[in-house]
Amino acid sequence: MEMTEVKKIKVWDIAVRIFHWSLVVFFVIAYITGEEESELHDFAGYVILGLIVFRVLWGFIGSHYARFLNFIYSPQTTINYARSIVEGKPKHYLGHNPLGAWMVITLLVTLGLTIWSGLELEALEGHGPLAMQVNIVESVFADDDESDENEHESEHEGDEFWEDIHEFFANITLMLVFLHIAGVLFSSYVHRENLIKAMITGYKQNKSD
Ligand code: HEM
Ligand code: HEM
């Protein structure tokens, strides 16, 4: 039996944990309800928008490990970390490791782009917060239209354009999520620590490797 004292350290505050598991639930709902026009889809999308806005704010005012300042790593540090994995002795971080941290930031960005393109789609149907902007843009371009007959057609093109973009970012995000989960499992394995449990309880064990 090891005699070294293992200290429990609070890493993820309650807000980060609720944010994370809500994001998981609503991302799954948003993804599977996307195929058809669905109120649940829009609702899930708006909840995720709220979660992302909250998380960005929390990245400035939240607890130590939640703050961006504590998990924005330089390219050099990130490369060194990747190298330490390849060499078989990965450096241990209490908060996000550098690769995980960049994944977190990338996920927040692609989620934001998915939501934005979703709102543009909504706007084309005359709904949502961006509907006003579309009306203005349309009225500006309306003058350039050769005839009114084109209007209906171009609306459909816009629909397809934003639908493709929306689908693209939703699928990019999904792929990153799989990579994210793989990273979590890999990191849990090499450090012999259960990161998923830590995201539930908030606690990690202090290890000095
Ligand atoms: C992270 C959040 C979101 C995810 C993961 C997501 C995912 C998806 C997916 C996978 C589709 C199907 C795309 C296709 O096969 O063509 C879709 C369609 C759509 N999404 Fe989202 N979406 C999100 C947020 C939003 C938001 C915030 C809105 C706007 C309120 C929105 C509005 C729409 C609309 C209007 C469609 C087209 C539905 C139709 O077929 O008529 N989405 N979304
Ligand atoms: C069941 C699937 C998932 C599991 C097991 C999981 C697990 C985890 C774990 C363990 C962490 C902490 C990583 C660390 O210790 O550095 C984390 C962080 C994170 N995950 Fe997931 N995750 C899942 C799904 C998702 C999904 C679907 C998304 C987004 C759509 C997501 C986005 C994030 C974000 C943004 C963070 C950073 C948390 C923060 O600092 O606020 N995860 N995840």
Image (cartoon, helix red, strand yellow):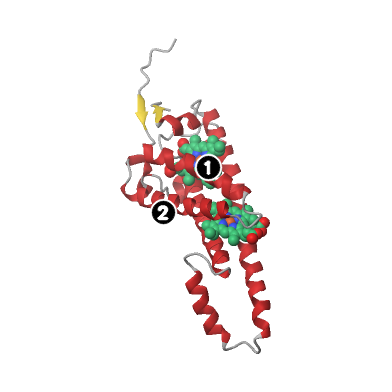
Quote the CA–CA distance across marks 1 and 2: 16 Å
- 141 to 87, vertically: above or below: below
Residue 145, horizontal then vertical, whole percent: 62, 87
Query: Residue at 48% of width from left, 31% of height from top?
Result: 195
SS category of the residue bearing label 1:
helix
Q: Nearer the viewer, residue 143 or 73?
A: 143
Q: Nearer the viewer, residue 198 or 14?
A: 14
**Label at residue 128:** none
- Image quadrant in which the C terminus is located: top left
Q: Nearer the viewer, residue 148 or 115?
A: 148
Callout 1 amino acid: Val
- Crowding around mark 1 (Cα neighbors within 10 Å: few <14, some 14 to 19, many 20+) is some
From the viewer's perspective, is 152 left or right of 99? Answer: right
Disc 1: residue Cβ within 8 A of ligand 2's nearest atom: yes
Callout 2 amino acid: Val
- Crowding around mark 2 (Cα neighbors within 10 Å: few <14, some 14 to 19, many 20+) is some
Q: To which residue does mark 2 refer?
A: 53
State which quadrant residue 13 falls in.
top left
From the viewer's perspective, is 47 left or right of 173? Answer: left
- 110 to 131, vertically: above or below: above
State which quadrant residue 70 falls in.
top left
- Image quadrant in which the N terminus is located: top left
Q: Is residue 188 visible?
A: yes
Residue 160, horizontal then vertical, whole percent: 66, 67
Report ligand 1 position as a quadrant: bottom right
